[in-house]
Structure formats: structure tokens, C-alpha cells
Image (spheres, rainbow, N blue to C red):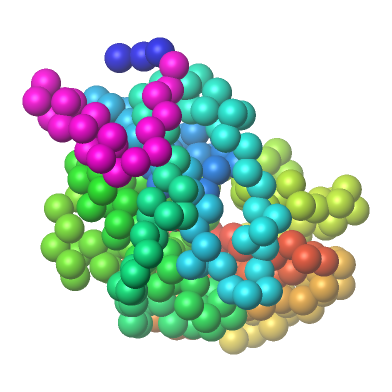
Amino acid sequence: MSGPVVIVRSVAALRAQVSAWRKDGLTVALVPTMGALHAGHLSLVKRGLELADCCVASVFVNPTQFGPNEDFARYPRQEELDAAALASAGCHVLFAPDVAEMYPDGFATTVSVSGVSEGLCGAVRPGHFAGVATVVTKLLLQCLPDIALFGEKDYQQLAVIRRFARDLDIPVRIEGVPTLREDDGLAMSSRNAYMTPDQRAIAPWLFRALTGIADGLRAGAKAADLCPMAISGLLKAGFDSVDYIEVRDAASLAPAESLDRPLRILAAARLGKTRLIDNIGVEP
Ligand code: PAF
């Protein structure tokens, strides 16, 4: 199946399309996004089409996951470009609901996940993961895909989604897809477009900081020594502030000190008004 992407805006139209596929015995992948699509998103579509017959990508800039002083209003919106990119990747349906379709009058439900939502980005962005969990729960129930794909760049988000999908018995396979990087190591992100050329030149130091910590852990050093040095290095490189750099257990996200099991090193730092996040895995 290939051709132009079909744009649907209502839950009813999405369900009709998915039911038609199901009647033909076809399986369905869902790629939830907020648009401003880049190669990283298209790699999720590609992987979705390796694992299922049909692919739906949703584009919805979800107001409930943005704090009052965050970038909801200026978040890039470019539906025509996104539709063309999805068509070129072989995606079949673009689900693009408006806010009233997603949150009709009287909407009053929040999905909130304790434990994995706390700390890291959860500490700096109160309410963010409840907004993500609520909208992703809705998207999963609206589409009822066999598989839903998310980038590992948002590693804590992926852990939150795995947690509530399991806790709520949502019958879907959650698949994490490795981060795509620019040639200089910067993780691809829709927010990279906010940066000035000077900020863009500094940004790859975030990935270098993570790989430096991974090297230190492999050499036997402790997170408590490595992370403060990495923070100083980022500030010296030109970052305005560092929200966190932490070493966590790769599966549970519990704090970790040394390389005695698979770990994840996660960071968030700010260049002007742009907040960048990144993470890498490190194995014993
Ligand atoms: O990662 C994102 O783009 C968003 O947080 C998601 C998963 C589409 C929910 O709005």
C-alpha cells in the first residue's frame, strides 16, 4: 500500500479507516507526534511499516503537556510539509485533530503516572508527563493500533508510556526507536530550529558531555564525580543553564552510581530560550 497520505481530523474517521484495515486482516502502527517532522520521526514511520502493514502518524501540538511559560504558542506548525514528508515515508494516514476534537467541552480526566514521571524532566516541567500520558492514552484508544512507536530521545517519556500502557492493560506493543543524530552528534529535534547559528554551534557539547560520562563510567569512575564535571563543562562551552545530568538504571530509571548494570545517562540544558534534552545508554 502506498500513495498520498490521507488526512483525517475526527476520531470517527480514524476509527472507520482502522476498522476497514482490520476487516482486510491488516495490522496497524501508530506514530504519535507534535509535527515539525524531521528524519527522526520518519525513522519511526519506517520502523512502524517494518512491523505492521499500515501506518497512522498523528500530529497534535498537545496544550496540556506545556507549562504556562513554555513554547506552546511558538511550537512550529507546518501541516503541508509534514503531510508531504509522511507521504514520502509511505505513511498511510495523518491524524490531525484540533484541540476541540481531542479535548471536547467538559473534558475532565488526567492520566497521571507516579514513580517514573518524577525527577529528571518531571522535576523541571510539573504536569508535563500527565499531559503526555493523557494524550497518548487517548491516541492509543482512538486508534487501537497493534504497535505504537516513540523515539528514545524522550527516554523518560518512553518509560512513562510503557508504565501506563502496562498498568491500564492497553493492548498495544510499545516500541522505542533509537535517536537519530546530526553529523556532529546533536540529537534531531523539532526544537533545534529555534537555535541561532551560535547556539547551534554550542549544542553538540550536550552529546559530548554524555559520551564523556559514559567513558568515565567504563573506566570505573562514579556518577557523583562525573556529572558535576560535565555540568561545569557545558556551562564553560556556552550553555546558559543545565537542568540536570544524571545517571540512571536503564530499565527502572532509579538513580545509579557505577556501571554494574545497563545504565542510561540523561541530560537537559538550555541555550537561550531553547531547552535541549538528550540521553545515551551504557552497558557494563
Ligand atoms: O514526543 C512527542 O512528540 C509528544 O510528547 C507526544 C508523544 C506526541 C505526545 O504529545
Task: Give me the residue at 43% from left, 55% from top.
Answer: 100
Q: Quadrant of residue 78?
A: top right
The x, y position of residue 42, in whole percent, is 49, 33
Tell me residue 114's x, y (percent): 33, 82
Q: In the rendered structure, which segment of residues is drawn in magenta? A: 4-30
Outermost residue, right side: 198
Q: Residue at x 28, y 35 (%)?
A: 13
Foreground residue among 258 and 18: 18
Task: State which quarter of the image contains the C terminus.
Answer: bottom left
Direction front: furthest residue? 105
Look at the picture and state if 239 lies above or below 122.
Answer: above
Q: In this orientation, which residue lies closer to the viewer: 254 or 2?
A: 2
Instruction: Examine the rendered structure and indicate whether residue 184 appears above or below residue 282.
Output: above
Residue at 28% across, 27% down: 54
Q: Is residue 211 left or right of residue 193?
A: left
The answer to whether one can see residue 16 in this image is yes
281 over 124 or under it: above or below: above
The residue shown at (50%, 67%) is 65
Total of numbered circles in the picture? 0
**Left or right: where does residue 136 sit relative to residue 212?**
left
230 with respect to 145 (left or right): right
Q: Is residue 91 visible?
A: no
Depth check, front residue: 153 or 264:
153
Q: Within the magenta stretch, is there residue 170?
A: no
Residue 25 within the segment the image draws in magenta: yes
Q: Is residue 170 left or right of 142 when viewed as pictured?
A: left
